[in-house]
Image: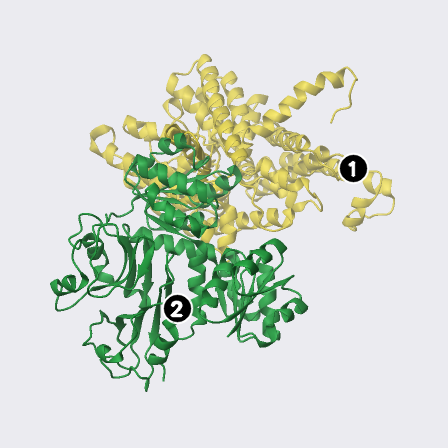
Amino acid sequence: MTLASHRSGRVSWWGGRGERLLTPGRFPSIVANVVGLTLAVVGLGIVLAGLVDAIDGGPDVVVLVLTGVAIWAIGSVMWRVTIVPKQIRTLDVFMTVTLAWLAMAVAGAIPYLLTGQFTRVDDALFESISGFTTTGATVIADIEAASQGVLFWRSTTQWLGGMGVIVLVVAVLPTVGAGGMSLLSAEAPGPTDERLTPRVRETARRLWAVYLGLTVVLAGAYALAGMSLFDAVAHSFTTVSTGGFSPYQGSIGHFDSAVIEWICIVGMLLAGGSFTLYYRALKRDPKPLLRSTELKVYLLVVAAITLWAFVVSGNGGGQAAGFRDALFTTVSTVTTTGFVVTEYGLWSQTAQLLLLLALPIGAMAGSTAGGVKLVRVVAVASFAHREALRQLHPRLVRPVRIGNGVLPEDVARRVLGFLVLALAIIGGGAFVISATGPDMITSFSASATAFGNVGPGLGDLDHAGDFLAIPPVGRWVAMAQMLLGRLEIYPVILALSVVTLRLPQVVRGRRRPD
Amino acid sequence: MHVVIVGAGEVGWYLAQRLGAEGNDIAVVEQNEIIAAAIAAELDVQVVVGNATEPSVLRAAGIERADLLAGVTQNDEVNLLASLLAKEFGVAQTVVRIQSEELRGPLGTKLLATMRADVVIDPDADTADEIMELAHVSGADEVYSMSNGELFVIGAVIGAGSPFVGHDLAEIGRSFEPNWRFLFGALTRDGETVIPRGDQVLQAGDHVRVLTTRDARREILELLGAATRRARRVMVLGGGAVGARVVEQLQREGATVVLVERDPDRAKRLSERLPRVTVVQGDITDTELLSEEAVSRMDLVIAATGDDASNVLACAYAAAEGDAFTVAVLHRLALLPLVRQFGIDAALSPRTASANAVLRHVRGGTASVATFLESDIEVNEFVIEAGSAADGLLVAELHLPHSVLLGAVTRQDGTAEIVRGRTRLRAGDNVVVFSRPDALGVTRRAFSA
């Protein structure tokens, strides 16, 4: 008997879900409810990793399964003794999303510690955050020495973080009501809060369905191209999520297979596009996808950087880059995936500079990619264009546009604010990281790659997202940047402001916490 | 013919005047008593005060014996309902004025068919179309296309540099033998309009309407000494229904357009709808704003607000500052003789634009109708019916009265030519005729079997 069914006294564990929601005696708390469900999902993921380890007869079966069950149990209890309140305020939403991600990060770090993969708490936390935020930076020195279970858990964190655990939670929650959409847009990458269906739960389900479908197709393609089943699933998880973790030290380059690299390029490109638009296209409404200005910009950016890297590097500016290498590295960077097939650190400086600039930008809104998102760059460019025109026409009336679409003025302002904050976070982060020791290029690219959720960087970071070159203090900065980048700043900052503003009052007992 | 006109606004008033002049019985239904009294005092028409959506009011206007109902109020719903009621009373034809753009679209067509409206007019759209014709043939102050665009009636003022000045039409005709590509259809001098004959001598400042083939329209404008220039930089003043349509069309044609709109909300909506247009918020008579937006460097300035005075003032300022061709929309025709003194090149009125559309329908057999702002001369198109008096005759043998001028003929294969006395007419030909309204009956009889 759970606490919830005990209180209500008449509802069984598995049945009557709808009724149970209405039963009295459950605490109304969206934070506890969503965090609980998130933990339950994470717990199940750890159990799955344990089972994978068992297939290999690995050493971590028991630890992983027990850890997973424990986290699942804690999460389930939290979920079942609480209820989503009818009225949800905006602050609650940001609080919920931020806390859910923190809880996820901590829960995800536990397996690393208990299996003995890491001895330091901050290393485990770094690996966990890097996973869930689909960054793909790592502090494991010898990846191939880790057990299959731990490696599978790494890939799973990225897969869960890619489309977003909150999106998954909203898809599962029986009722989230009006707050659901704001939960979704607080977590979903990019400034689109477009509904596919009138009911937010259906929207969340459809997004996950497309995500799951793409994962399955990609895993199949990898397997056909010669990967083992384990490798195929692990890499498909980290490709669709634009994460970039690989069970091999050599990343995708380990396989040394043109076919696998092409599959990976296509997979990353798809994952960098908008899943909302994919769903529509699958439902025979391909116009929004084909007419998307952001898609054109996305493909143009990829083509431009690829050609530059290919041509310039081939002209004696540095080591010649093969076309496939140039394309792979560009796609991997622009989509914020972070797979590596070549030593791009040997390319010409201009090509490397382009990669550095692309690090924090990311791909399309509504994709699994991290970073600022191209649509925001397009919006800010339109904004700047308008302000320049206004010098000529002081009384000009002109909207900020994305292609032919009009961006409402308040959204445009938010985007501009976002970009300023992003620059401040990247710049400030680079400063703090460099203060801990690394050189300028390494520090800046560490900061950009963390905020952009890419993984690898330049300077000392140019192989498979290895953050061992960054001292512990710098890693803490990177952890914060990864979360800020994944949640797109505002939820985290607002949640922090709640904590800093209200906590003293709560401590002094003047107010109940919200 | 008994005609019921619903709404004595600009369009209704003009229609009543025009159709009444042709000897039709007109009944006007108007809700506003003051307007009703005014039209009753001015025109020889029956006026019924009341709401046209009430059958008793329509019955009082003689709807049971009416052949045509024109619903031309500002209110789409009233016009539609009046039309529907008229059909119930057995009225053969209805004309409905619709302002909602969506109702004029594909979905609206279905609705209008269900409502059994025969002709749909929209004064704003018609005005915008006429403005666009002017923009295409710049230098002209009136442009009407006839015979599916094969022929044009172009109005222009003869410039001092024109080779025509000081010559009579017969001389001019001789210098263009053997084939004429244009013909003078009407001439206005000192406020009086005539259908010119061969001995008419042209002077600088004469306002002429020339019937021309499509290929020759630019050439004739040059010969008339009117400046012709493609409108690349255009300023549109006023983003109302007319202005917005014009701007949309200009944008599609790739012109550089500056649009000035006073209402901030409307300006914002227009700027969202028109991505390639520079939308500026402000008053169109604010000269500082106009010079800020470089009115002096424009090729074409179109003032299309609802306020005549502002339109005239803004155009006058534009004409003084630069050499743009200026077009003003005027709602009160009485102002028209004044506008040229302000340097305004062309003026047009929403009511004549719409009235042309209605008249075209009322005339039945005619394909296009043009009426001029300053006179009662009309241009009509007729199809020559087999077995009619004109079938097989030479033009010279028709013996049309002096108030009628047969201008051009379009053969069944689509070729258009300016007629001479020796041109032979055949059944199926389409003819363009300049005439006064009182001669319309004679003309129609000549072409019908």
Q: Is residue A437 above or below residue B40?
A: above
* Separation of residues labelled 2 and 1 (CA atoms): 89 Å
Is mark 2 in CB contact (under 8 Å) with mark 1? no
Q: Is residue B138 visible?
A: yes
Residue at x-position 32% and y-position 79%: B384
Report which colour depicts chain B: green
Give the quadrant of the N terminus of chain A: top right
Tell me the crowding category of disc 1: few under 14, some 14 to 19, or many 20 or more residues within 10 angstroms, Cα based: many
Question: Residue A267, position in %: x, y?
Answer: 43, 45
Displayed quadrant of residue A385: top left
Q: Amino acid at mark 2?
A: Pro
Circle 2 marks a residue in which chain?
A: B
Question: Residue B65, position in %: x, y?
Answer: 58, 76
Q: Is residue B7 above or below residue A300?
A: below
Q: Circle 2 is placed at which residue position?
A: B437
How many numbered marks have been drawn onto this rendered protein structure?
Answer: 2
Q: Is residue B258 above or below residue B157?
A: above
Displayed quadrant of residue B352: bottom left
Residue at x-position 50% and y-position 44%: A230
Circle 1 marks a residue in which chain?
A: A
Q: Circle 1 is placed at which residue position?
A: A81
What colour scheme governs how the chains and residues are painted in the rendered image of this protein?
A: by chain
Residue at x-position 75% and y-position 19%: A506
Q: Pick out the residue farthest to the bottom.
A: B387
Q: Amino acid at mark 1?
A: Val
Along the line of sight, which residue is nearer the eye, A150 or A102? A102
Secondary structure at badge 1 equals: loop
Along the line of sight, which residue is nearer the eye, B270 or A348? B270
Which chain is rendered yellow in the image? Answer: A
Compared across the picture, whether B87 is left or right of A236 comes to: right
